[in-house]
Amino acid sequence: MATQYKLDAVLRTDSGKGASRRLRRTGKIPAIVYGGAGEPVSVSLAENQLVRNLQEEQFYSSIIDLNLDGTTEKVILRDLQRHPARPVVLHADLVRINAKEKISVVVQLHFVNEEACYGVKQDGGKVTKAMMNLEVNCLPGNIPEFVEVDVEALKLGESIHISDLSLPEGVESVQLAHGEDHDLAIATITK
């Protein structure tokens, strides 16, 4: 993990729809921090800081240093509630993490060698992607920035499955943990 993310939070005492609306008008986003050994805590985050970080795909599966009233906690973004019609974040859920406990996170799939793919160059096919991200289970320190999917050797009609991926050490697919029948196709070369 190359990038270290930080968010500043302020403890929030008022709750409810009206209080959240007032908070959003002042450029703050209501959020909750839960999990770990502590009790759930309602906080507010600076909207500009959160939105700037949300523009990076890596932020969604990275460890975040949450500065809450002078103390720092390690958290991960678990959920976002967005406005249905406008590009506005309404609420965020942050989960405390323990460096010694495995967690499940969703990481992005990066497809490489699409232009050099045998099925595309030689057979005139195209790469059809069935998945754009993958849920993995690992220790927080082992969370990969992304998982690379190399499609260069695929021929027309062939697929690459989750079991074909080379995941970093200590990282395992949640789907494969459920059994072989969950070995889904990630990409297929189609006509």
Image (cartoon, rainbow, N blue to C red):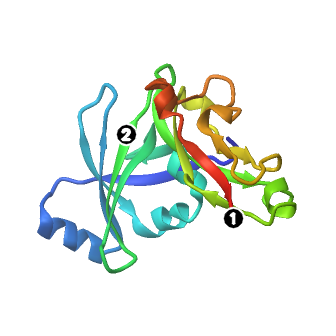
Three-letter code, disc 2: Val
- How many numbered tags mark residues here? 2
Query: Residue 173, image x and y in percent?
Result: 54, 31
Residue identified by numbered label 1: 191
Q: Quadrant of the C terminus?
A: bottom right
- Which element type, helix, strand or loop, lies under badge 2? strand
Disc 2 residue crowd, few under 14, some 14–19, many 20+, Cα 10 Å: many
Dot 2 or dot 1, earlier in sequence: 2
Question: Mark 2 and mark 1: span between their CA atoms?
Answer: 44 Å
- Which element type, helix, strand or loop, lies under badge 1? loop
Query: Residue 84, image x and y in percent?
Result: 30, 74
142 left or right of 102 in image: right
Three-letter code, disc 1: Lys
Residue ID at (29%, 30%): 38
Query: Residue 181, image x and y in percent?
Result: 47, 30
Residue ID at (14%, 57%): 15
Q: Quadrant of the N terminus?
A: top right
Residue identified by numbered label 2: 95
